[in-house]
Image (tube, rainbow, N blue to C red):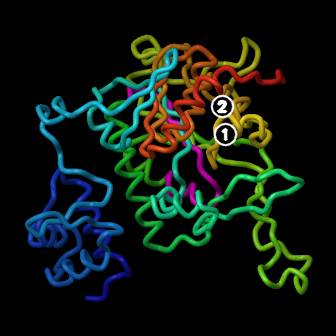
Amino acid sequence: MRRRPGEVRDAIVQVLEGRGSAATVQEITSQVVQLIGDVPSSSVRSYLRLNTPELFVRMDRAQYLLNGFEESASPHARAAAVEAPSFECGQATLYLDDCNKWLDRQAPNSIHAVVTDPPYGLVEYSDVEQDKMRLGKGGVWRIPPSFDGSIRAPLPRFTVLKATDLDALEQFFLAWGRRLLRVLVPGANVVVASNPLLSYLVSGALSRAGLERRGEIVRLVMTMRGGDRPKAAHVEFNDVSVMPRSMWEPWLVFRKPIEGRVQDNLRRWGTGGFRRVSATKPFGDVIESAPTRATERKLAPHPSLKPQAFLRKLVRGVLPLGQGIILDPFAGAASTLAAAQAVGYQSVGVERDAEYFRIASAALPRLAAFQVAPR
């Protein structure tokens, strides 16, 4: 029987997604056969080995787990987990931890909204690529030349991602979305920064995790991404742009399914919609935004720093009644937490990189106090 490319691999992924623990090759094969018909265990073993460690993780006793998942811990083990190092500033708390491990320890129905700018391709925030960026060697990061004495922020180059990188990205956000779903209250908004090259993967994974897609918020901003002439042939093809110059940034909007009607959910959980800008102006899905200025970057030297002028509008809108806890599980320089602090909201953030945690701890109070020009 001739199978379509990737059919066995996709069936293995489906089997492991539904388990809370690792499985042997024999166990996986048995369930794959139930899904797509006869498949030799040797084929399943070959697919597992071929896609490890990018997609699958080999555990002890020759068992396999989907990359991004962890074996279910008992309630006692979760309760005994050591709390991560933290930093507090006003109503904001920042933890030095892996976001998935942190989410596993949180109580169900404890978070009211998420605003986050995650690593788009995961690769760029690996230890290896971060070391390259900090040394100015590039790697997946493009290090722009200085201009008029101004040192511009590095940009990740997602066109270099391999198929295995894209698979890992999708599986990571599927696992993350499922963990997130448990801790969110019904009706909680989840707003995730992305980019036009990879947003379809992130969006598909979060939908499969059980979150409802509610559209996109457009950050209307001119970035440095795209618009370049062909490399090493810019004179010959002077009138050609390899990619369109990016003039916007998509922020994906999802929601945990509500209980009953919107008004019922608002009364019980305080969630289910967006806070209006004013009595006469609803929250809109296009927000004009300048690039992050040098004055802010000095306060928080992070390569993906978003400006407070934009974040405060976004953060204010995600809690419809102005009450609840906002989470940023990829906190970076804590700019989301600073925006929440500035508008009077309670927030919590998680950052796994010790250097960024140190930067964020210093930057959070400075960014929260940063004066944004009224518009």
Which residue carries the number 2 mark?
A: 311
Q: Report the front residue among 52 and 318.
A: 52
Picture residue at 25% right of the left edge, 78% below the top: 49
Q: Report the front residue among 252 and 311.
A: 311
The image shows residue 97, relative to residue 174, as above or below, that is above
- Asked if residue 9 lies in the magenta stretch, the reply is no
Task: Tell me if label 1 and label 2 are in contact, CB under 8 Å.
Answer: yes
Q: Residues within 10 Å of mark 1 (few under 14, many from 20)?
A: many
The magenta-colored residue range is: 184-203
The image shows residue 375, relative to residue 192, as above or below, that is above
Picture residue at 55% right of the left edge, 13% below the top: 321
| Amino acid residing under circle 2 | Leu
Is the N terminus in the top left, top right, bottom left or bottom right quadrant? bottom left
Which residue carries the number 1 mark?
A: 306
Image position, residue 3 (x, y; %):
32, 83
Picture residue at 76% right of the left edge, 53% below the top: 152
Image position, residue 191 (x, y; %):
55, 37
